[in-house]
Amino acid sequence: MSDYILVVEDNDDISLLLKLVLESAGYQVETVNNGKDALKQVETVQPQLMLVDIMMPEMNGLQVAHNVKEKLDHQNLPILLVSAVDRLKDEQLQNSQAEDIIYKPFDIDYLLSKVDSLTSNY
């Protein structure tokens, strides 16, 4: 059975790209376009990894990651943040409790290596 990944991305084109790339690598992928839906979906589908965009309306990716990690059932769930802003403060990233971050535009091979690494450790 392949690993299940929850992609949280408000840009439909990037969401579709991530879904296609990850599915072609053998992952099962569910997508949502906002943080509130992400918090609901993580409870429903129990993913092995979350790929979360940082800049989203209502609830940003840092808040999503922090809220997920606060739940006992999800403290070990790996979260990979995705951002177009490459100057986030270390403190912000640490407070989110996410495992890692990649920056847009990203290299697909680099993305897959990060995903493979995080899912193999979960």
Image (cartoon, rainbow, N blue to C red):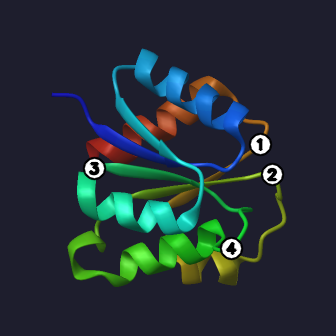
Q: How much space separates mark 1 and mark 3, taking CA atoms?
A: 24 Å
Pick the residue in front: 100 or 31.
Answer: 31
Q: Left of 43 or right of it: where is 22?
A: right
Callout 3 amino acid: Asn
Ranked by sequence position, the earlier of labels 1 and 4 is 4
- 116 up-or-down from 89: above or below: above
Task: Indicate which label's residue lies in the foreground, 3 or 2.
Answer: 2
Callout 4 amino acid: Glu
Residue 116 visible in this rendered orientation of the protein? yes
Place of residue 18 in the rendered image (x, y in percent of width and height, measured from the top left):
57, 32
Ranked by sequence position, the earlier of labels 3 and 2 is 2
The N terminus - image quarter:
top left
Q: Are marks 4 and 2 in contact (CB under 8 Å)?
A: no
Callout 2: 10 Å neighbours few (<14), some, many (20+)?
some
Q: Are marks 1 and 2 in contact (CB under 8 Å)?
A: yes
Callout 1 amino acid: Lys
- 46 up-or-down from 7: above or below: below
Q: How much space separates mark 1 and mark 4, taking CA atoms?
A: 21 Å
Ranked by sequence position, the earlier of labels 4 and 2 is 4
Task: Indicate which label's residue lies in the foreground, 4 or 3.
Answer: 4
Which residue in the protein does label 3 denote? Answer: 121
Task: Indicate which label's residue lies in the foreground, 1 or 3.
Answer: 1
Q: Is mark 1 on a helix, strand or loop?
A: loop
Picture quadrant where residue 55 is located: bottom right
Q: What element carries label 4?
A: loop
Place of residue 103 in the rendered image (x, y in percent of width and height, measured from the top left):
73, 48
Ranked by sequence position, the earlier of labels 1 and 2 is 2
Which residue in the protein does label 2 denote? Answer: 84
Callout 2 amino acid: Ala
Which residue in the protein does label 4 denote? Answer: 58
